Image (cartoon, rainbow, N blue to C red):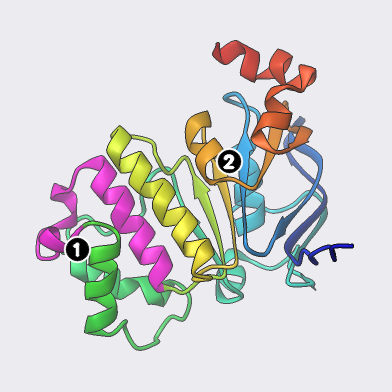
Amino acid sequence: MTATAVRTAVVEARGLSKSFGGFRAVHDVSFELHEHEITGLVGSNGAGKTTLLNLIYGRNSITDGRLLLDGTDVTRQPAFRRVRRGLGMVFQHTTIFPTMGVRENLRLGALRKHPGADPSSPDEIEAMLERVGLAEQGDVEAATLSHGEQQWLEIGMVLLAKPTVVLLDEPTSGMTKAEAARMADLCRTLIEQQAVRSMMVVEHNIDFIRHISNHVLVMHRGTIIAAGTIDEVQHDQAVRDAFLGRQA
């Protein structure tokens, strides 16, 4: 008899809800992000995906429910405290410093987690430039990078803060097919090498989700309507009706 591997929950969401005035953008959402896994979060525009990421990260306050990080209740903690506990987020719209050089942006990455901390070492900076494919652009102003390259820079800055959990909001937006494939390789490598413990990725690119995810959550109108592998959710009739069927 084969022993069942224990799946460690790094993030636990219990009945999360978010209301903006009379509009409930997220309603009673529960899930776990497990160690050594990439969870895909898919759904149509307006389903509540980015709002859910913002609830986890702390950009939006939680109206109802609880959020635990490594078993600690962080429901009422602000974003900077969650970052110090190991949360990192790559936003769809980059938060780089456009008038600064690429290397200078990366040097500031660690400060997202520990303000006043020593900057990353030169070796760490050079290794990250290689990892995100910007080795030839280290000395250029960040504003001159393409949208896809700015996204890589943002990812490098987040990784230099050494997060244990990374949230990514449409990371392949504006990227070429080759860049998206490299992004998939990076996500898998980070998990395989245990550089991060868990990831959650919002994407409309279902092929990308198929290539990287161990587990998929499907959102529709602020709720989770299905969970499982990508094949399982694609064959779920509620999912086909609410989202995937519209993509055909």
Residue, x 73% and y 22% (percent of image)? 235
Q: Give the secondary structure at mark 1.
A: helix
Dot 2 amino acid type: Thr
Compared with 225, 167 (above or below) is below
Disc 2 is placed on an element classified as: helix
Question: Does 88 sit left or right of 176 as displayed?
Answer: right
Image quadrant in which you'd find residue 213: top right
Classify residue 173 as left or right of residue 237.
left
Residue 64 belongs to magenta span: no
Span colored in magenta = 134-160
Dot 1 and dot 2 residues touching (CB under 8 Å): no
Residue marked by disc 1: 102
Name the quadrant containing residue 246: top right
**Residue sitting at 79 percent across and 65 percent down?**
5
Q: Is residue 147 magenta?
A: yes
- Give the percent coordinates (x, y) of residue 40: 61, 42
Secondary structure mainly formed by the magenta segment: helix
Disc 2 crowd, CA 10 A, few/some/many (<14, 14-19, 20+): some
Residue 76 x, y percent position in the rendering: 74, 65
Q: Is residue 245 above or below residue 159?
A: above
Q: Disc 1 marks which amino acid? A: Val
Quadrant the N terminus occupies = bottom right
| Residue that label 2 marks | 50
Residue toward you, 17 or 121: 121
Q: In what quadrant of the picture does the C terminus appear?
A: top right
At x 26%, y 59%, the residue is: 97
